Amino acid sequence: MADYNNILNKIARLQQRYRIKGTSIVIADSSKIFFSEHRGFADFYGERKVEDTTQFKIGSITKVLTAIAIMQLVEEDLIDLDADIKEYIPEFSIKNRFDSHKITIKNILEHRSGLPSDNFGIMLTKEAKDYNDIITYLANQYLIAPPGKMIAYSNIGYTVLGIVIERVSKKKYTDYIQKNIFNPLGIDANFICTPEDFRQHKYEISRSYNNLGEEKEDYITTIIPAGSNTYMSAVDCLKIAQLFLNGGRIGNKRILKAETIAMMLQKPTYEDEEGYKIGLGLAFDQYQFSGMGDVIGHSGGTIFHFSQMIFMPEQGIAAVMLTNSTNGSAFIRDVFPLLLEVALQDKGYKRPSSRKTKKMYCTFRIEEYTGIYPTATKPIYISYKKHLRLKMGFIHAKMFLKTNNWFDLKPTGLSVLLGQALKQIEVKVEKETLSLKKSHHNGQADIQSVGVFVKPFDILPTWLMACGRYACLVEAKRSVARRIKLFIKDQFLMAKLSGGMAGSRIHVLGTVNETEAIILGYGRNTSETIFMGNKILTYMGSKFIRESCFQTFLRRCKLNRLGKLFKNMFKSKKNK
């Protein structure tokens, strides 16, 4: 039998290292749990420890519930996966710059609908919203790509699926999930969609903690909760994974037909999904264990709660890990694969040996790679000066092409300080699409297409005049950014985002007309349209107003005064 003692010690060390206040982990086969660990606090200041019944925010694992509900309605012939979304939401509309614009239910399930990714102005507003706000919002937006063409993870898309479920079933989304999934599976869960919901269930659910271990208020998404706002325990979340191991049945309760489960377990074969893949509501290849078959499931990530649910049909194993702290994603990435390795040892798994082999490098045509590749975070520059070189922010590296078409990166300048980190990253450019591969010390690797090659083009006069600084009209924690700076660099219009939900980012923009520009790049939060009018910049649902030079001057003076004040306070404390 698997020995978990060593991994338990490592979990304890990593939990302290990453300042994870609370975590809940379970591993099981199709019917029973054989590993269960619940550590830390659900409420640190209230001294409420994590137990097997403690409910964590599972985030986007909720999308699996939405997918199950859609497939139940498919079985009842109430939904056709290939039908146009307008058949279920007649008033649905979205602007379009492409010849193909029919959006199907299947497109949305697979995150290939061409719908924008997020709207922070609606998702994180203090006032309660309903789904009709999303429909109204989309009527004034553009498709980011022809449906089916590009994978771009979309919270908005799953909100639309929640609307479809309500329209077809004639029930509220939460009521439908409760009756048709939670009750049959024996799941005790809560949808926390308003401050009142939080107050009602605050002693059942975990609190939220930042990377300093301080308790924080979690942001509540007030729109229909088809994509995020579910709280449940790891033990109950495990039942969702076991449902797929048992062909759609738990005990004597059948949730989906066996043939429907088989359809959901088909791995997609789209060319642009080299690594992580998304099928009918389920993700594939987040983890790789050679010879053990597919690893299927879904992760969830909010500001403070991170979660992972997986199952392996060929091995009959399911596992769930939930956390309540900002560094939860890194904690899960370090711990979860090691736990699964131990569980798989009983199935005969051995991690492939990591013997060093001589790397073979080859020559290439420079012009096939040099240029600028915008991404959702920062532009990547590839240039040639004796060597092919990559630049992204402060990272500088030489590129060496291997026989498998991936480039090794060797840091230069101050980037040598990141030498070990850059050794784990490889780059590929194929069909003008740039992909990154990041290898982890636990034998896992992430592959993702992140950028596309673009050429400089004319920037319209209105946008040239619009360059400057913009301040958000709402509080930063409920916006895509606190401030945006529009500027010209390398013959491109760029937007620098700071603060807010997106953090520090630089987007490369392509102007379409005097009032519209597109965020260039590939995947989530790219190809979306931003709007300009009357000194107001609208960016992913958040509005920003142009700052005058005088306003910028005053703000900087204020920041300088605050900086000096804190500096003097620090000096005085040090002297004491």
Image (spheres, rainbow, N blue to C red):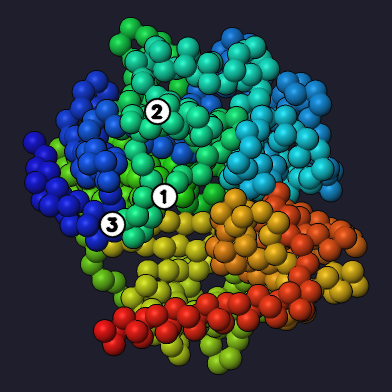
User: Whole-percent x and y of residue 69?
Assistant: 53, 20
Q: Amino acid at mark 3?
A: Arg
Find the distance from the CA under tag 2 to the CA under tag 1.
17 Å
Find the distance from the CA under tag 2 to the CA under tag 3.
25 Å
Q: Amino acid at mark 2?
A: His
| Mark 3 element type | loop
Residue drawn at 22 percent across, 33 percent down: 51
Q: Is residue 151 left or right of residue 326?
A: right
User: Whole-percent x and y of residue 120?
Assistant: 63, 47
Specify the quadrant of the image occupied by residue 468.
Answer: bottom right
Find the distance from the CA under tag 3 to the CA under tag 1.
14 Å
Specify the quadrant of the image occupied by residue 355.
Answer: bottom left
Q: Amino acid at mark 1?
A: Lys
Mark 2 or 1, nearer chain start: 2
Labels 3, 1: front one: 1
Residue pointed to by mark 2: 201
Residue drawn at 36 percent across, 50 percent down: 215
Could you tell me if the residues under marks 3 and 1 are in contact, i.e. CB atoms within 8 Å? no
| Mark 1 element type | strand
Q: Nearer the viewer, residue 464 or 248?
A: 464
Question: Disc number at residue 302?
Answer: none
Residue pointed to by mark 1: 216
- Placement of the N terminus among the 4 image quadrants: top left
Q: Is residue 189 left or right of residue 554?
A: left
Label 3 crowding class (10 Å Cα cut-off): few <14, some 14-19, many 20+? many
Q: Is residue 441 left or right of residue 258?
A: left
- Placement of the C terminus among the 4 image quadrants: bottom left
**Image height of 12 relative to 402, above or below:** above
Question: Disc number at residue 19?
Answer: 3
Mark 3 or 1, nearer chain start: 3
Confirm whether residue 366 shows in the render: no
